Amino acid sequence: MVAVLPRDHCPECGSEARQENGEVVCSGCGLVLCDVIANEAKYYPQVTTNHHYPRRRVQVVFTIPSDEMKDRVRHVVGIAMWQGVKMSEEKLRAIAEYLVKKHELGQFPQKPLGIKWRDIRKVERVVLPYMRRLRRSDEDYLRWCMQRLDIHELKLENGYTAYEVAATVMRQISNRQLRTRCALAIYYVCIKYGIDLSKEQIAHACSVCTSTINANLHLLSYVRE
């Protein structure tokens, strides 16, 4: 797993940045540069019907400080108890941590040891309507995709950067996976402002297929900047 740090050096003293306890800090003065870190992890999707693995992809997950993780788990436990879920607090806390990692941080957590899938699904059905992926994490992923294409700081004719316009577009696309929404937002910006990037390049940067972009192009007709 490779950490994608937002900065390599501290803007204050110029020292190198390092990862520490889920944060990016300066090795010289200790300044906290970022509290959310994107990580690249290679994985293989399920085997296709013709018994061949699809192409290798890169999944981006986000890490957060341990204190913030504890707060989110405590929040999910409170929701489950409020909704009348009856099980031991220890089991409920383990399931809540699993659900936070899966639904809010985009990770691939292992099933908690000694807990049945039916118990996880029981809690998931109750708390999922009250959980949502943080917008900050969504936009961090969009920025990371645009950094791969080297257009995140590109100035457009309206005075905004390509990233700012793409973020506005992405918020208006709903009921699609994060990677799909990012790819559509970037494609919209490239087409509207004449940025020379192919659909294949955008799909590769966002870890989706070009057919996914083609199948969802109709959603861009509802976008308003």
Image (cartoon, rainbow, N blue to C red):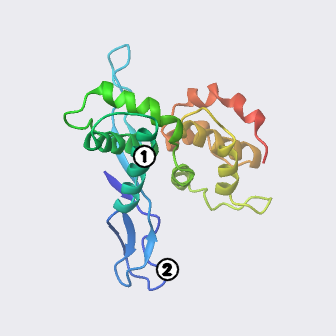
Q: Is residue 205 visible?
A: yes
**N-term-proximal mark, 1 vs 2:** 2
Q: CA distance from mark 1 to mark 2?
A: 40 Å
Which labelled disc corresponds to residue 140? none
179 and 120: which is toward the camera: 120
The residue located at (72%, 28%) in the rendering is 218
221 and 96: which is toward the camera: 96
Q: Amino acid at mark 1?
A: Gly
Residue 148 shown left or right of residue 53 in the figure: right
Q: Secondary structure at mark 1?
A: helix
Q: Which residue is mark 1?
A: 78
Which labelled disc corresponds to residue 11? 2
> Given the current orientation, which residue lies at the most extreme top position?
50
The residue located at (52%, 40%) in the rendering is 130
Q: Position of residue 201 (x, y in %)?
A: 55, 41
Q: Secondary structure at mark 2?
A: loop
Q: Nearer the viewer, mark 1 or mark 2?
A: 1
Q: Position of residue 152 (x, y in %)?
A: 60, 57
204 and 172: which is toward the camera: 172
Crowding around mark 1 (Cα neighbors within 10 Å: few <14, some 14 to 19, many 20+) is some
The residue located at (34%, 79%) in the rendering is 27
The residue located at (44%, 49%) in the rendering is 75
